[in-house]
Image (cartoon, rainbow, N blue to C red):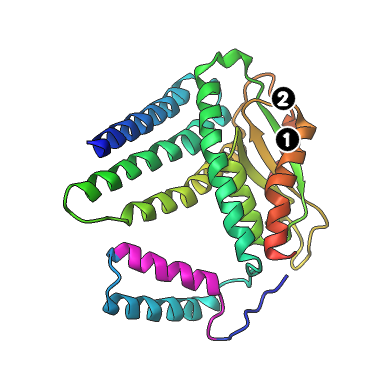
Amino acid sequence: MRLQARFRWLPTPFRSLFLFMVWLLLNNSVSVGHLVLATIFAILIPILSFSFRDPQPLILKPGLALKQLLIVLYDIVVANLQVALLILGPSKKLRPAFIKVPIDLTHDMPITILASCVSLTPGTVSAEVYPIAESLPEGEEPTQRYLLIHVLDLKDEEALIKQIKQRYEAPLKEIFQC
Amino acid sequence: MISEWVVSILLLFGGTFILIGSIGLIKLPDFFMRLHGPTKATTLGMASMLIAAMVYFANSGHGLSVKEILITIFLLITAPISGYMLIKSAIHHKLKAKEGTKGLDNVEDD
């Protein structure tokens, strides 16, 4: 895991790239003026806002991150079809459940991404991360974190936990190297 | 001509998904299950509607417009967050889950 970027003037390289793209998309143009302005914003905004944030792990495997993004997009489409079928089917047959998934990630950013992936993919909505950060004594790190998720139709708890860990958590650990 | 077909199919597809998400809001028995509709079914519905808008404007002489990609990205980022805030406040208010919900003891008080 690396918290510090290689260059001091570029504390979060991928966020800069993202800002650059967003500016060009917003203006819907690639003229020289907008390219220059986008570059200025992409460098200035992260520098100015960096000191307000807790340092978060950097993306160290961009190729893998792109691959994971495509997997999640595919899963979103599948999730939508599945949930649509579940909603249209008889509601009495649904077996809702709360389950706790043990997670090994330690920083807010990867956990947020994991929780969002879980929310967007088949039949699950993430609800809470245990232990709750505010309930811990100041400065103490929990030994094991859990992600509480609500499942619309639970078939096999073990298999679901295994699937979430393998499909979403393992690649995130690779990407952030933590 | 082909683009018209693409636009209509995408619009119908998106509309169907948003409709199904809304049906879920009425039909499902408890709050936690109702949340599944809006967090998922609507993201795909909105995405296909926005792609339809992109295809339509690209073919109507206004030039290629890519802002819709931005809207899609923002929707994808914010949908799970709003779902999370809703379910967190539901747990905080101790809303009753449907009878027979498994693993209720996994929910801790805060």
The x, y position of residue A165, in whole percent, is 74, 46
**Residue at screen point 69% across, 54% down:** A171
Chain ID, mark 2: A
Spot occupied by residue A13 in the image (x, y as percentages of width and height): 54, 74
Front position in the image: B45 or A139: B45
Q: Is residue A122 left or right of residue B74?
A: right
Cα gap from disc 1 to disc 2, whole angstroms: 8 Å
Circle 2 crowding by C-alpha within 10 Å: few under 14, some 14–19, many from 20? few
Mark 1 or mark 2, earlier in chain: 2
What residue did someone put label 2 on?
A155
Percent x, y of residue B67 = 32, 56
Question: Mark 1 sits on what residue?
Answer: A160
Give the main secondary structure of the magenta stretch: helix
Q: Label 2 sits on what residue type? A: Lys
Amino acid at pointer 1? Leu
Q: Give percent across and percent down for residue B14.
A: 37, 33
Which residue is nearer to you in this view: A91 or B68?
B68
Q: Residue A48 got which mark?
A: none
The extreme left residue here reads: B61
Q: Does residue A77 show up?
A: yes
Helix, strand or loop at mark 1: helix
Determine the residue positioned at 73% across, 52% down: A170
CB of mark 1 within 8 Å of CB of mark 2? yes
Query: In the visual, does A13 lie left or right of B5?
Result: right
Q: Which residues are magenta?
A: A9-26
Viewer-proximal residue, A123 or A100? A123
The quadrant where residue A1 appears: bottom right
Pointer 1 and pointer 2 on the same chain: yes
